Amino acid sequence: MKISVIIPCYNCSSNITKLLNGFPDGLEFEFILINDGSTDDTQYVIEQYISVSSKDISLLNIKNVGAAQARTVGLKKSSGDYIFFCDSDDAVYSENIQFYINLIKSEKPDLLYFSSVMYLPNDNVTINKVSFNENIYFSNSDEFLVYQLRSEQYTSAVWTYIFNRNVLINSNAKFTIRNAHEDHFFTLSLISNSKKIFCCPKLLYIQNVTPGSLTNSIKSKVYLLSRLEAFVESLSLLNKDKFRLSRKLYSKWSLDAFLQLCKENKKSSLSVFTCLTFYKIMINNIKLISVYMMSKLISSLRTL
């Protein structure tokens, strides 16, 4: 069994070797690094690392196309039975990697979710991203989504799980070509086609939330609209029969997230509300959004 680790790289010369060193030598990994048009010495640093490393590493140098297309390039190059996306600024918890290799071999899951954290270096604070208190197994994707949404820790981030290549093939999962929220449809496609989802509490991934990163930055009108478009696109996967339990919860999660972004980025949200695209989305999904707004109104009245 082989695991493909796919890492889009953009101006990451200061961290990429640390990420790669987090994976012990001699394990069943192939590393696909996509240099996404970096303007620093990322290519040189990676080439130097490859020249002295015993790891199976491939470097693909491409023009800058963004994370969505870079990951797609990596998928086409990869050959592993399982696939693990990492972001080049982040880190892995080395001590638990062998544990997860053994778990994959024994359980053969379609999707393997692990605990992950976000590290804020400016504040020297670590907070949970996805956290499980015990091993949990789901044979129903609707029930898994309900569990994650009700526990308020659902995320579409592709580095929060490892997935079986067969699920990728069967789901025809694809990244949406846009600058933000490109992974919502991809993640839901994998979930909706998984019959064995295994969740484990052992920590494996650390997201480094650095100053100036997309997570920390002020969001533009395009970013806010992309969040709404990702919701509508993803909703097309959640048909009413198969996702009877989670469809409304997912809608609430998405719309809550959109409204929160608007509150945090008031200047950009004002331009969103004067944009024709916003009203097209609202009109095309009027029934669903009306139900959501009514539930928010009822909730507000209950607190009076």
Image: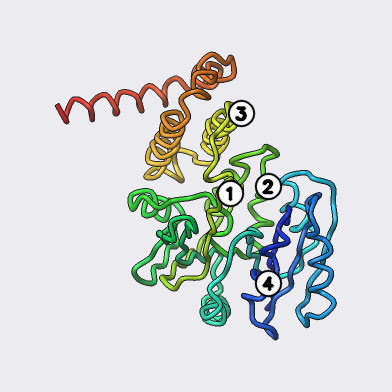
Could you tell me which secondary element the residue under label 3 belongs to?
helix
| Marked residue nearer the N-terminal end (4 or 2) | 4
Q: CA gap, disc 2 to disc 1?
A: 8 Å
Within 10 Å of disc 4 (Cα), the crowding (few <14, some 14-19, many 20+) is many
Q: Is residue 59 left or right of residue 285?
A: right
Tell me the quadrant of the picture where the N terminus can be found.
Answer: bottom right
For marks 3 and 1, the one nearer the N-term is 1
Tag 2 near tag 1, CB within 8 Å: yes
* Residue with the mark numbered 4: 20
- Mark carried by residue 189: 1
User: Which labelled disc corresponds to residue 198?
Assistant: none
Q: CA distance from mark 2 to mark 3?
A: 21 Å
Give, as a three-letter code, the residue at label 3: Val
The image position of residue 119, as x and y in percent, is 48, 60
Distance from the alpha carbon under mark 4 to that under mark 2:
26 Å
Element assignment for label 2: loop
Classed neighbour count for the residue bearing mark 2: other residues with Cα under 10 Å, few (<14), some (14–19), many (≥20): some
In the rendered structure, which amino acid carries the disc numbered 2? Lys
- State the quadrant of the C terminus: top left
Q: How far is disc 4 from disc 1 in space, using C-alphas?
A: 28 Å
Disc 2 designates what residue?
174
Residue position marked by numbered label 3 in the rendering = 222
Which of the 4 image quadrants contains residue 234?
Answer: top right
* Label 4: element kind: helix
Mark 2 or mark 1, which has the lower sequence index? 2
User: Of circles 2 and 3, which is in front?
Assistant: 3
Q: Residue at x 46, y 46 (%)?
A: 242
Left or right: where 113 falls relative to 72: left
Q: Amino acid at mark 1?
A: Ser
* 251, 50: nearer the viewer: 50
